[in-house]
Every structure is written in C-alpha cells, then in structure tokens.
C-alpha cells in the first residue's frame, strides 16, 4: 500500500506493508543520505521481521541530501513516525510496540530519530535496529582509509559533506545529524545491530552500543568477519544467514 502524507517539505510518499495487526516498524532506507528509495523496504530486514511475526512496516520516501540537506531527512522520518503513531488504530499498530530501524544511513537516521523522539516525548519507541549505522561525521579508525566493498572512505566523505553542507568539518554538528555526537544516552530504547569488522562503520557501531550499555540500556552488536557494507543483502552468504537468525532472536520479545 502506498500513501501520501503532508511532510515538513511538502507531500511525502510512504510504502506501508501489512502482514497482520501488531508491532509497527518504521524502516528507513540507506544510501549514505544521498541515494536510495523507500522501495528498498521490499528487500529489507524490516519487511522480513514484519512478515515473520505479523505486523506493519512503514518506509518513508524522505528527502535526500542532494536536494535537501540536514535536517530534512530527520524531519521527514519523524513525520512518518508520528503518522504511524497517530494512525495506529487505522493501520492495526500496537502503540506499545513501535520499532525504528534501518540500514547504513537509515540506521543512522534510526538512531537519530530515537534521540529526537525521546527528547520530544511524543512517541514512545520500544526498540531500535540501526544496522551497520552511519553515525559519525568524523573519521574513525575503521572509516579512515577504508577500501571495503559497498562503501568506502571517499564515499563516506561525499555523503556526509552533502548531508551536512556548511556544518561539515565544524564543531557545530548536532547529535540529531551525527548521533555519535550524543552525550546523553539515558532513556533511549533497547538496541540490536550487527556489522562486519572490515567495513567503515565497524568502530562507530561498537561505540554506539558501548555508550548505550554504559547508560544502562540493553544493547548488543554481533560482529562478523568481512569487509562488505550491506552484507546482509547477500542472502546466500553464511554471514547474512547468521545475521538474519540473530536478528529474529534478538527482537522476538518485542515483536510478539
């Protein structure tokens, strides 16, 4: 089902997949903040979870950074979250089981939305799934001089520079733009993620989980050996198969 809503930048399209009444999953596509489309949800772990347990997944066609830099994507994704919550009865969503997730930049936006929703106090999020998330606008040990498959250092600089524009390289970047800048992790929802150890976002993913744990938040990352960003899309590989199994197990109590 496709639906058009009024977003902060005008009309915004949502793809809504319904597999029964139950948890609602806001699934945010990746693409370095500059690429991608809502239809990527058809191949996502978000769809897999909704289909596995019966639920509703919503994928927003948020504005990309080439046309509209930060905070456009954040505002659009939050508008989609609010729409899910405000129309929960109509969509068959359990308001007590709202989950936010996504891959790569979508994972970064998922983490940012969790902070934003906590601070606004309008929508309670029960769980977050920021898979191999793009969280840090500065180089880390793993994102610096990285030549892995699927995403690399050059592409990472390109994505962040377009998303942040004049803020890029400054000390004025909000944690809503680059969630690694957060200093307060209290009150955020429990989290599960996974990442390969040779890809650019290895370090920032582990740091995010450690910061959540230190704030008393239940959070876990599974690390696989490899250097492919988006490895879970390679469904035939052993890493992808194991990641799928681990994800199903990690979110089971939040989905049922």
Image (cartoon, helix red, strand yellow):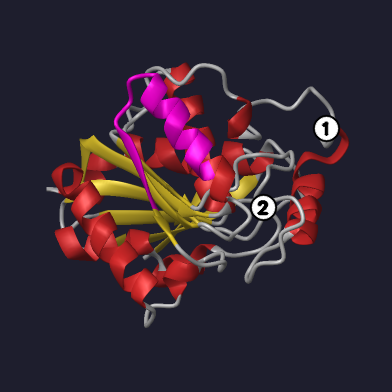
- The picture quadrant where one finds residue 243 is bottom left
- The image position of residue 113, as x and y in percent, is 49, 34
Residue 167 image label: 1
Query: What residue is drawn where x is 76% and y is 60%?
Result: 155
Residue 135 image offset from top left, x and y in percent: 60, 41
Give whichever of 175, 17 is nearer the camera. Answer: 175
Q: Between disc 1 and disc 2, whose residue precedes?
A: 2
Q: Secondary structure at mark 1?
A: helix
Q: In this view, which residue lies farthest toward the bottom?
A: 236
Depicted 112 relative to depicted 108: above or below: above
Q: Measure the alpha-carbon separation of dots 1 and 2.
A: 15 Å
Q: Quadrant of residue 124?
A: top left
The residue carrying mark 2 is 33
Q: Is residue 226 left or right of residue 67?
A: left
Whether 248 is drawn above or below 236: the answer is: above
Q: Is residue 211 above or below residue 35?
A: above
- One can see residue 213 in this view: yes
Which residue corresponds to the image point at 68% horizontal and 42% vertical from the top-left?
140
In the picture, measured across the screen, residue 163 lies left or right of residue 193, that is: right
Q: Position of residue 59 (x, y in %)?
A: 45, 56
Few, some or many residues within 10 Å of mark 2 (<14, 14–19, 20+): many
Quarter where residue 163 is shown: top right
Q: Nearer the viewer, residue 182 or 242?
A: 242
Task: Name the element at disc 2.
Answer: loop
Toward the viewer: 14 or 98? 98
Q: Which residue occupies 36% across, 65% down?
A: 1
Residue range highlighted in magenta: 205-222
Provide residue 178's location: percent of width, then percent of height: 65, 35
134, above or below 46, in the image: above
Question: Is residue 6 visible from the viewing direction of this image?
Answer: no
């Amino acid at each position: 089902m496709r639906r058009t809503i009024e977003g902060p930048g005008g009309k915004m399209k949502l793809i809504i997949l319904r597999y029964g009444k139950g948890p609602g999953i806001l699934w945010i596509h990746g693409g370095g903040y500059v690429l991608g489309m809502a239809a990527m949800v058809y191949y996502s772990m978000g769809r897999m979870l909704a289909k596995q347990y019966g639920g509703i997944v919503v994928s927003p066609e948020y504005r990309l950074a080439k046309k509209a830099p930060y905070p456009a994507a954040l505002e659009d994704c939050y508008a989609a979250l609010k729409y899910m919550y405000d129309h929960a009865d109509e969509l068959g969503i359990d308001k007590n089981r709202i989950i936010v997730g996504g891959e790569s930049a979508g994972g970064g936006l998922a983490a940012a939305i969790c902070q934003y929703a906590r601070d606004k106090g309008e929508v309670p999020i029960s769980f977050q799934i920021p898979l191999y998330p793009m969280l840090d606008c500065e180089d880390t040990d793993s994102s610096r001089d990285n030549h892995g498959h699927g995403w690399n250092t050059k592409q990472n600089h390109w994505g962040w520079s377009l998303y942040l524009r004049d803020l890029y390289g400054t000390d004025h970047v909000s944690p809503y733009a680059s969630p690694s800048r957060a200093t307060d992790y209290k009150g955020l929802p429990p989290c599960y993620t996974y990442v390969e150890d040779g890809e650019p976002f290895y370090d920032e993913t582990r740091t995010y989980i450690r910061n959540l744990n230190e704030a008393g938040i239940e959070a876990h990352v599974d690390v696989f050996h490899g250097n492919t960003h988006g490895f879970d899309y390679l469904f035939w590989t052993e890493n992808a198969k194991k990641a799928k199994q681990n994800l199903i197990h990690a979110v089971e109590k939040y989905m049922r």
